[in-house]
Amino acid sequence: MSSESSAAAAAAAAAAQKPDLDPLPAAKKARISRTRWTFDDPCTEMESNIVAAASLSVSGRAAHEDLDADLVVVGMFGPDDDDDDKDDDKDDDNAKMEEEEKDKKGESESAAAAASGAAVALEGVAKDLDDELGGALSAVMEENSKSFAGGAKLGVATPTLRAVVPGKKGVAKRYVLLGLGKYPEDQKAKGDYGYKIGSAIASKCTAERGVKSVIVVLPLVNQEAVRDMSASFYSDLYSDNRYRNGTNVKVHAENLESVTIVAMGRKEFTASESKGMTASVEEGRVLAGGVFVAKDIVNAPHNVLNSESLANFARKIAADSGDALTCTILDKDQCEERNMGAYLAVARGSETQPQFIHIVYKPKSGEVKRKVGIVGKGLLFDTGGYNIKTGGMELMKFDCGGAAAVLGAARAIGELRPDGVEAHFIVAACENMINEKAFVPSDILTASNGKTIEVMNTDAEGRLTLADALVYADEDAGCEKIIELSTLTGACMVALGKKMCGVFTSDDDLANELDGASRSTSDKCWRMPMASEYNDQLESIVADVKNLGGRYGGAITAGLFLQHFVDKSKPFAHIDIAGPVWNDKTGATGFGAKLVTEWIRRQGV
């Protein structure tokens, strides 16, 4: 008997021995198909979460008898205290000494201000409600004077007061006082004002089970604040249920149907004002959609999200935009044609083929004042390669945080469609894994601009993929300005913590642009030095540059390395988001999506 016949006979015998199985129930089939994963083939699709359906609107009426909702939130500014402003300018030691002095006198200035301002702080609608409820709101404020401080702490709310509505037997409502900080001198709601209010509203809506309708009364409302409230409100209702079943599914504010923001003490808005407010709500919702995309990407596990499924998700973002975005994916052969030796070296260890993502936005008018490039680090999982990580590897799915921010911004820009700017969103997607083809320390790689790179450590791989992505943005796409976002170094986290990103650029104008976008979106950033004297750490004895510097200044040398792959005459910024991209309690934060969206929008102005 031939070997082929023997193999066929063995296969037939094995098939005959398989037990007869009952057909799978429909529910189980649906659950299995949802994973889109098999033993032999990688996952090719990633599911996404949808922004909450609850409506958000703005009204100009604010009489207390009109506040008919399950939950009524009344915003109030804290008492004026000039001394607090002076204290802000003093150093910590002096502040501590002054506090000790106050303690000796037996009086805390902030507590005194809250106590003395409690009675006068309740004005307008808040006072009318308090009178109607027999002083119950004042009592709640006094009981929580330390934490609430008479409204002086922005975004801090009192415990919920449940009270029967006078004259309506058996009808109970819930009331909350919300701190708005101190009244701004220029009478403009800006900075964190809208974002913290939106987050507080989302938190209360989630905590108060069964609430369907909410009214939020605010003494200061403008379009920028409404946009920010909308963005943070919808963003904070995010809950990742893609991998949960049954009772493990968690939906924030599950019964919520509507939230109405009411401007205290003014008449209905004009038609023009109303249209502007509605547009601001929608813009905030779009920004939240971008944040959802960023969170979905970072939260997704590697057995779901790889280079192929990310590329397909990028295609979907472009398809969903109508004709606003176009998406091109370069495969391995096309990357080789462009001599992307640094990127492809990292990708060699992956199960899936490298996918180089390029999404383009062009304004419908055709008028382009600025052509910008936004590059995001797209490592879907980072083992460290042969310099394998010895701890914290379970978090290395977040090494695609830069790509997440960039694709989230692409989603938002595709909906907002700003004029005057052409934007190129670029991600070199792959994984840093180990196999017989993976790159190793001492390899010398050649990037697409001809620069040779000596590999000192395979766990400094992100900058290698970014090198070819930056050359592509510079030379192939012809971008005039380039920013790049990446979870690049632990050194930046040590320097700045987990609340803000580091901006590394030699261009003052670009630094100021990013600072302005940061202040507008509450994605906080801090400019870091680009110390050229640290370049000697990157000098190689066998190649043009090393991929890793010395022990100290690692965040700076990472930025200096990336400068080798962008024309020196072009404004370029490296943004290290390793710290703020992940929260240990809640997971992905979506950091960077709003920052990038706002920066792009301003380029066309």
Image (cartoon, helix red, strand yellow):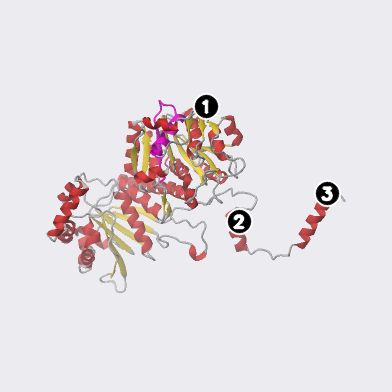
Q: Outermost residue toward the bottom?
A: 169
Residue corresponding to mark 2: 33
Q: Secondary structure at mark 3?
A: helix
Reading the image, the residue beneath label 3 is 3
Q: Is residue 555 magenta?
A: yes
Mark pair 3, 1: CA separation? 52 Å
Mark drawn on residue 280: none
Find residue 450 and name its label.
1
Q: Is residue 80 visible?
A: no
To which quarter of the image does residue 344 belong? top right
Is tag 3's residue or tag 2's residue first in the polypeptide sequence? 3
- Furthest residue to the top? 569
Q: Which residue occupies the foreground of this view, 88 or 36?
A: 88
| Magenta segment | 552-578
Instruction: In the displayed orientation, state which residue is furthest to the right.
Output: 1
Q: Secondary structure at mark 1?
A: loop
Q: Position of residue 167 (x, y in %)?
A: 26, 71
User: In 3D space, how far apart are the residues under numbered discs 1 and 2 (Cα atoms)?
Assistant: 45 Å
| Left or right: 547 as drawn, with respect to 13 | left
Find numbered disc 2 in the image and state the secondary structure of the residue it sits on.
helix
* Residue at the image point whose x is 38% and y is 32% from the top: 534
At 20% across and 66% down in the image, what residue appears? 131
* x and y, in percent, of residue 254 in the image: 42, 62
For label 3, count other residues whose C-alpha is less than 10 Å away and answer few (under 14), some (14-19) or many (20+).
few
Q: Quadrant of the C terminus?
A: top left
